[in-house]
Amino acid sequence: MSELWNIWWVWLAAALALAILETLIPGYVFLGIAVGAALMALIVALPLSIGPSALIAIFAVLSLAAWLILRRAFRARNDQSRIIHDDINQ
């Protein structure tokens, strides 16, 4: 099972599956994880020997960073929240 962590196309297939899941369940949650998995496919394709625990840690950091960047990129330009200063009953 630990051999699957070192195969680049497994990471790419996971990225594709998460991207498809994002289209079915929108919310920009799975898209950051998909970007992290796609970046992991690039890292695993390099001739480096990284253990499975380090790969999972790198994947978690990349996914979090991608999610934060995408959250900032896809947020609403003008915040739709209203701040009410006066009570209507006064």
Image (cartoon, grey):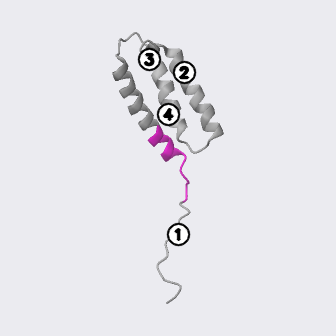
Q: Amino acid at mark 1?
A: Arg
Real-space CA distance between mark 3 and mark 2, rounded to the nearest whole angstrom? 11 Å
Tell me what residue is drawn at x 49 percent, y 76 percent: 84
Residue with the mark numbered 2: 12
Q: Which residues are magenta?
A: 67-78
**Label 2: which secondary element:** helix
Residue with the mark numbered 1: 82
Tell me what residue is drawn at x 46 percent, y 78 percent: 85
Q: Amino acid at mark 3?
A: Trp
Residue 30, quarter of picture: top right
Real-space CA distance between mark 3 and mark 4, rounded to the nearest whole angstrom? 16 Å
Real-space CA distance between mark 2 and mark 1, rounded to the nearest whole angstrom? 42 Å
Residue with the mark numbered 4: 33
- Horizontal side of residue 78 vs 85, given as left or right: right
**Label 3: which secondary element:** helix
Which of these two is toward me, 1 or 35?
A: 1
Real-space CA distance between mark 2 and mark 4, rounded to the nearest whole angstrom? 12 Å
Which of these two is toward me, 87 or 42?
A: 87
Instruction: For marks 2 and 1, give the one nearer the viewer.
Output: 2
Quarter of the figure that contains the N terminus: top left
Real-space CA distance between mark 1 and mark 4, rounded to the nearest whole angstrom? 32 Å
Q: Amino acid at mark 4?
A: Ile
